[in-house]
Amino acid sequence: MVSNHARNGRRIKQTAKTIIAFAFCIVRYPFLIAKLMKIFKTISLSLSTIYFLLSARLAFAVEVGVKIPGTDKTSFTFNSYISAILKYSIRLGFALAVLMLIYAGIKYLTSQGNQTAINDAKEIMLGAIIGFVMLLLIEAILIFLGVK
């Protein structure tokens, strides 16, 4: 039987190892931390804006006269209008991410061993994959917030 003192000692050691590993990452890869902070700021600002727009419970209908792709109507409440625009934007983002992956794949295949072209293609692929993952996270957050 393990005593509480031994269990707490193991937890402290694990916590210390985690803190040391995190500090090592900060010292070794400061550009990565800066990039992650920039992404976090962008996501938090976007989510704050979305929350502000969706939390406004305006009851009036907006007559836009333009049909949003994927919907059947031209008269919306404010919330449903913003929701329809968000859904359309996310679909468009997914399509653009796939197109960028295809473009990067073609660029990679036609690089003919040129290192700069290969590196450019890899950067485009990484950016498209990051964008795709961010769109998945935004979609999950919108589902969590109850945006239909």
Image (cartoon, helix red, strand yellow):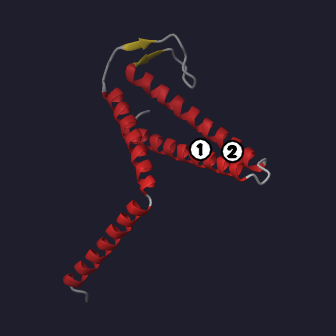
For badge 1, the amino acid type reads Ala
Residue 128, numbered label: 1
Answer with left or right where residue 84 lies relative to residue 48.
right
Q: Secondary structure at mark 1?
A: helix
Q: Which residue is mark 2?
A: 104
Foreground of the two, 105 or 94? 105
- Rendered location of residue 53, percent (x, y): 35, 27
The residue shown at (46%, 45%) is 137
Answer with left or right where residue 28 lies relative to residue 60.
right
Residue furthest left as drawn: 5
The residue shown at (30%, 71%) is 15
Q: Secondary structure at mark 2?
A: helix
Quadrant of residue 124 in the image?
Answer: top right
For badge 2, the amino acid type reads Ala
Foreground of the two, 76 or 54? 54
For marks 1 and 2, the one nearer the N-term is: 2
Q: Are marks 1 and 2 in contact (CB under 8 Å)?
A: yes
